[in-house]
Amino acid sequence: MELENINPNIFKKSDERPVSESEKNENTVDPIDSREVFDLIRNINDPEHPLTLEELHVLEESRVEVDNEKSFIRILFTPTIPHCSMATLIGLSIRVKLLRSLPPRFKISVQITPGTHSSENAINKQLADKERISASLENSTLLEVVNQCIARSNR
Amino acid sequence: MKFPWTTSIVDVLKDDNKVDEKLQHVAKSLVKKGGDISVVIEELGPALTHKDADIRLKGMKFLSDLLKNIPNDFLNTAQFEFISKFYVDRMKDHHSITPQVINGLLALIQMKNFPHSSIIQILQQMFAQILCQNQTRNDRSNIFSILQYASDNFQQELETMGTDFIYGVIQAIDGERDPRNLLFLFEFMPRFINTYELRHLNEEMFEVFSCYFPIDFHPSPNDPKAITRDFLAEKLKLCLCASKDFAQFCYPLALEKLESDLTVAKLDSLSLLSHASSTFEVKSVLENFDDVWQAIKKELLPGSNNKEIRAKALCVISDILKAINNDEAHFEIILNKIFTNAIGTLLNRDSSLFKPTLELVIKCAEASDNSCLYVMNKVLPITLTEMTTNEEIADSEKCDILEDFHKFVCIMVDMNKLGEYKNDNYMISIQRELIKILITYDSDLSKISWKIMTRITPILSDENRQIIYSKLNANLTKSSTEEAECLLELAKVYPHEIHKLVLEEHFSKKYDNEEFAKNIFKTLSPLLIVPELREHIIEVLCINLFNNHLSVIQLVVLDILREILNSSKSPEIAKILYGEWRIVVKLIDLIKNLNIEKDQEVMYRASLIMSLVIRLLPNDQQMELVEKYLPRMKLESSISDLYITSGIMAFLDAAIPVENHFEQLVNELTNLSLTTHDENARKIANQLLCSLFNRAPVDDKHKKILSKIYDILKDEIKKQNHHAVIILGWISKGLLARGHPDAAEILETLSELLDHPKLSKSAELAFEIISLEFPNLHLPLLKHLFKQKIFVLAMKFLDGKIEKFSEHHLTAMANILQITPHQVLKMNIDKIGPILFKCIETGSDDNSPHPKRVLLSLKIINNFISDKHQFILTNLQRLVKEFLKLSQFKHLMDIRIMACKCLEHLTKFPLFTLVPYKNDVTHDLIPALDDPKRLVRAAAVSARMSWYLLGENENDKASNI
């Protein structure tokens, strides 16, 4: 397969989140925040390169919006190039990883950062469609590819 | 001589199965009587010339074996001539006889007086008549041995044979397939190639070895002493580089195989290139450099993800640079070739080639001292340009630049090349930039700048040093680790400046602010290791400890002293503190004069410092202190005496006898511990008891004292005094650690007390005391494997009762299991398995189990899971159920985390055993995803993902291979 983006720019990974005192305290409640959600998805692998979505700046912490009270999460991701054919796959991987890692009370929206992809609306629509998401995961080949992207993030 | 049998030799060889015995007999009598071997051969005549090849074979075997069995100086020249002629002749005989001919020849040429002239004839005939490849493995090995022995011992004669000999050898060894024979050849041939001139046969010889490259060999799994592939490859490499004339063939071979897709081939080729560069002449290295560099570039820039290949490729470059280090004319040309592309990339940090290029450049710098200078001359301007030209550069990027520069500085220091840059303009400019950062920033950027400064202290200019001192001085009370390290480096190089400008100015008084004092002591106390500064620092510490009556400051000083005494330099400093500063006496005075109500913490810490100093003294000084102070102590009436005793006794060497004071000490300590209301004092007393009983010798006198104390304690236990149970726990801890014979009895009493209606809780605590390790408790005598012993004893006393599964028993047992080595637990898994299960079982909600016990047991079970123990597999269903329950355990987050971890580790078991539980686990972990604690959520996510991805990783692995 031909690579679409041969020499992408690589950015620095953020450090591991330090464990705070209040997190070690038995009695305090740590709300789910944007950093925690970002940590769940930042290590997902790009389908094309052996790099994480964070390193390619496809995902950035500032583009992760979390409302713990209202159980709502919105994530904007930025494809490396405007005509990237992998955008849907990346979106799907993010979605699947979050579906598996977050409590079911959350409503999750995964979208492309406005103005960064040529067929932004179409992809957003696909990613918002629950039926299509679950249908795509019935496809064992596709599921395998998604699992591979996610699998490395788990190590 | 005559043969000792009546029938003809032919019949003997035909029928007799005891030929060996007879052979020995002949050999012995031959040697004894000084007989002539030619007579024996004549006797053998009929057999050796028999028309049946089988008989001839037996005859030859008899003769060859005979040659092996006679002493190696038995034959004279005439006999040698005769026998070797005979053997040469025999080579033309039937092929089945050849092995015996070879056998005999091998014995013959190794004899002492073997005439050198005969070897040529033998070898010529051997090359002509015997096709080595047709022989069996063993016979080939014999032929190789003949070649080896001949070439090692008859060099002069063989050289006259010229290329015939070389050609014969090549033909003989060509195409060998047995790994053991190959190994023999690979070890012997480099020597051969170096001894004999190969002339025009260079290429032929090289071809013999090159056909094996790269080695593809898998040892038979049943071979007990298997030869490994890597071992063969290593030896082959030596053969391929054995002669300098091989260079012209070796480089093309390595480069060709480097293009392969096989990792093994690549690795072998790279290590061949490495070896070639360091063994062949510089000339050939230079001739082939362009091709090698093109090939290496492909591997490195951008290169593969295989770390091993990258490392080996870098090694090649490094070896080449090492090889040409002394050739100044070409050195620069070669490095220029490497750097033509590299410099451009080094200036563009965003490029994906940047990281590999940097790796390459670092390797070049490390290769040799000349290359280090070359690289630094390129790197310094680049670093300076990067730092100065772009004003808008982000801090994080500047940080990266400096991080990389730090690596180069470290190499410079390691290569001892720092001095060359003392007056280098670039270096001075970079220093200036660093100083600018130090003055203006206070972030990661300044941290890395400090790190670089620490490295380059010896070449810092006077002016820059002054700026650094003032910056350090300003930060003395809030200095970072990097600053402290830099200060220490500076102190090592410029002790007098530091003394004058830092210590005298800023460190010479009594302190009253706790935070302030803590920080400044922490920064400056590491300077103690510099002899010039030691006195000043100790003086200030002592002023603040003994003449300052603020207990917070005293605590700070004591803490600092503790850190110093636990560091690696401690023996030296302890000696100075004890000798020059008389610190032990001063501490004793300090403890005596302190207020018991207010300053107990200071007393405790001071006694700790005392014991740490005493621990490091020689035995006679320790002894002196014991005799001087112990008799005066009144433990029951004075708490400060207790602390002083603890200070003297706590870390006393095991060899110091304390028998004279033992009885009094233990009596007073026991009474004190039973009666006092001061918890701290009780703890000290208990620890001292533990340590004292641990060191006491096992003899009648001490046994009596022990049983007296034991009786007192038993009486107290009858009165339901729970302190007595605790004391018993401490004493048994000391006794168990040294394997005392009476320890078992006390442990039994303790385990019986677990059933006691009132004291069971204390007994549980006693078991915890036995299992815990206390950092300040000194047990001079530790018996080998005492933990196993405790486990065995505890199993004996508790096992029967475990059946009832009382809470206290389980907790006591979990404590013991915690200290038992994993190996021992493994051997006893059948017994402890049910206990562990019971320990993690959560009953109905109102009766929730002891959280600590659950955690301990989970950890042990987790170890078994990591081992992939069969026991886990047989109980999988039950375990998964319990783990899932525990993932929502209310009272302790650590248990929830541990349960999730156990679940995650379970996924390492074979897929088919796990699949039945997949849905349960992924479903029942959902509540943990919404746990109030973030750490639990993270563990739950990780566990749940592993279960979702069951089997994926295996596919992944398969595709990687």
Image (tube, rainbow, N blue to C red):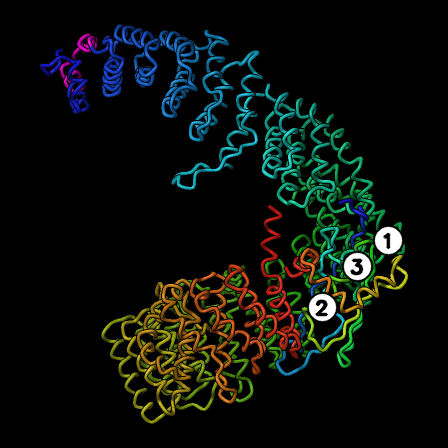
Q: Amino acid at mark 2?
A: Leu
Label 2 marks which chain's residue?
A: A
* Span of residues in magenta: B27-46
Which residue is identified by label 2? A98
Tag 3 near tag 2, CB within 8 Å? no
Amino acid type indicated by mark 1: His
The verdict on residue B29 being magenta is yes
Q: CA distance from mark 3 to mark 1?
A: 11 Å
The residue where tag 3 is placed is A88
Choose between B289 and B483: the one closer to the eye: B289
- On the rendered image, what quadrant is the N terminus of chain B found in? top left
Q: Percent from the top left, x then y, of residue A97?
A: 70, 65
B339 over B593 or under it: above or below: above
B662 with respect to B871 (left or right): left
Q: Residues within 10 Å of mark 3 (few under 14, many from 20)?
A: some
Query: Which residue is at a point 67% across and 35% down the rendered structure image?
Result: B317
State whether the magenta stretch is mostly helix, strand or loop.
helix
Residue designated by label 1: A83
Q: CA distance from mark 2 to mark 1?
A: 25 Å
Chain bearing mark 3:
A
- Which quadrant of the view contains residue B821? bottom left
Report if residue B890 lies within the magenta region: no
Q: Are marks 2 and 1 on the same chain?
A: yes
Mark 3 / mark 1, whichever is N-terminal: 1
Q: Position of residue B650 (x, y in %)?
A: 43, 73
Whether labels 3 and 1 belong to a single chain: the reply is yes
Q: Secondary structure at mark 2?
A: helix
Question: Can you give x and y, in whole percent of width and height, for residue B11 in the image?
Answer: 15, 15
Any part of residue B504 in sight: no
Q: Sequence order check: which comes first, mark 2 or mark 1?
A: 1
